[in-house]
Amino acid sequence: MREFSFFLYLFISLAFCVHDVRWKYQSWDTGFCERAEEAVPLFVCLFILHLAMPLIALGMGHLVFPTDAYTITGLVLAAVIPTGISSFIWVSIYRGNIALTLSIILIDTMLAPFVVPGVLSLLIGTSVTLDTAAMMSSLFWMIVVPSLLGMLLNEWTKGSIVPVWGPRLNPLSKLFMASVVAINGSVVAPYLADFNWKLAGLAVIIIFLASFGYALSYFIARLLGWNEADQVALVFNGGMRNISAGAVLAVSYFPPPVAVPVVLGMVFQQMLASLTGYLLGRRSQLLQKSDKTSAA
């Protein structure tokens, strides 16, 4: 079942890349990398994704669950996995920087096979057995290969594959995504069925860490004086994760308790993204009203 989940996720990634790669090319061509200083938001986001939040998750895990190595590992894994592909949708809705978002997704995707096992090995150490080589291989096939295939197919067909196959693959990708969630959920179901105070506390910790990721991204963007579009892009890319890939990794390479924090993150991620979007939208409306008042 775990191998089946892996192949389903491989298809999902490829379907997304075929459907969305046109945006990657159009946005990249707008000149994101024309000036070196425009790459600063990218590096800031990578810092939040793969250093700041994993360290915060590690500290929170040791503080709340000091003797539970599996839960600590799950918290760190949920924090260190690459940014969520669905962040593109949220950034588009709230008029963020699309070029920056897709650059973050693409580069973080390429770095994932090296960064995720490396950071886990550094932070978790010998607390839990890590099959680093196998994790690198899975990340490469699940995330990197579909992205490369999507770009190659787009280049080969000169973009014609998107309108033809995008609508056809989109329903299948959603169906298979539900299958991945069901398969991974079945592995951790025994740990979720018996609701107790530890599970409730873990859910609260997951919500806190995810919310802190959004807040940290927002305040860093404000501190650096970025425009509103870049702020929106950093908030969603710094707060969201490719949680489905994290669940596949947790189920495939760790004991089931490690997957519990990751699955809980899957439950709350879109709700928190929606709340964050609402707050950003309200802030934008207030700024517009303030600007109109000042102009008057």
Image (cartoon, rainbow, N blue to C red):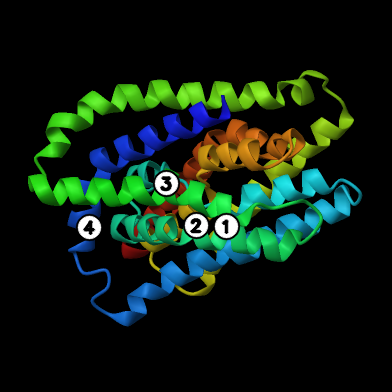
Q: Which residue is mark 2?
A: 113
Q: Are marks 2 and 1 in contact (CB under 8 Å)?
A: yes
Q: Which residue is mark 1?
A: 116
The residue under label 3 is which amino acid type?
A: Trp
The residue under label 4 is which amino acid type?
A: Ser
Separation of residues labelled 2 and 1 (CA atoms): 6 Å
Nearer to us of marks 3 and 1 is 3
* Residue 146 percent coordinates (x, y): 33, 45
Q: Earlier in the sequence, mark 1 or mark 4?
A: 4
Q: Earlier in the sequence, mark 3 or mark 2?
A: 2
The residue under label 1 is which amino acid type?
A: Val
Q: Which residue is mark 4?
A: 27
Q: What residue lies at 82% left-to-right and 22% top-to-bottom?
A: 195
Q: What residue lies at 24% left-to-right and 40% top-to-bottom?
A: 18
Q: Which residue is mark 3?
A: 141
In this view of the protein, which residue sits in the foreground, 161 or 202?
Answer: 161
Separation of residues labelled 3 and 4 (CA atoms): 25 Å
